[in-house]
Amino acid sequence: MKNLAITLVFVSLAGCSVVPKDESNLVTEAKPGLPETKVEQRLMMLGKWYGDLPTKEGGRKQWTIERSTDGTYRIDFLITKHDGTTQQSSEAGHWGVAGDIYFSMYRGAIDNGQFYPSNPSDPYNYDAYNIIRLTKESFEYQNIDSGNKYTVKKVSTNFTLDDSE
């Protein structure tokens, strides 16, 4: 009986012991402020950018993307197929950046000034990219799902795809 009482005392005391906190598992009570470098990163992404890359199918993909301060974007594409035929399209959506991830949410196509909304529940309409390099003049990023790597350069707001070579 004495052994049982001693065992119960030790078990009770063990339950009262303080387990050291794992500092790596602690969270802040509120979202911390952004470092100035992250604020600058978002500002650098604003404005109009131009990209021009060969396609895996033997053609050429050119585009301009204009990102606005309100988190919206518009992309105009010019695809030149390997046989020389061209296809133009435009889309609009929302964009953002968190850490070293750039993301976009396609909201719909634009044709002759008319907006055709997409299905917001379709996961295909959401993209995330690793930011590889970002300066005031150029931006390199990689789609996390497809692995496609893109490079764009900053252009004036009145630049159009017709201005490209």
Image (cartoon, grey):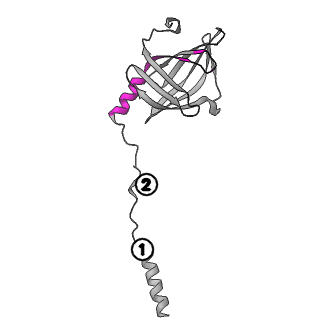
Image quadrant assignment for residue 116: top right
> Is residue 108 shown above or below 39?
above
Q: Is residue 58 magenta?
A: yes
Q: Amino acid at mark 2?
A: Asn
Residue under the point 63% across and 31% down: 124
Residue 36 locus on image (x, y percent): 33, 33
| Along the line of sight, the residue nearer the viewer: 27 or 161 | 161
Helix, strand, or loop for circle 2? Answer: helix
Rounded to the nearest whole Å, what is the CA distance between mark 1 and mark 2? 21 Å
- The segment highlighted magenta reads 36-60
Residue under the point 39% across and 69% down: 18
Residue under the point 47% across and 85% down: 7
Label 2, on which residue? 25
Residue at the far bottom: name it.
1
Q: Is residue 68 magenta?
A: no
Residues packed near mark 1 inside 10 Å, few (<14), some (14 to 19) or many (20 plus): few
Dot placed on the residue nearer the N-terminal end, 1 or 2: 1
Residue 12 visible in the picture: yes
Label 1, on which residue? 16
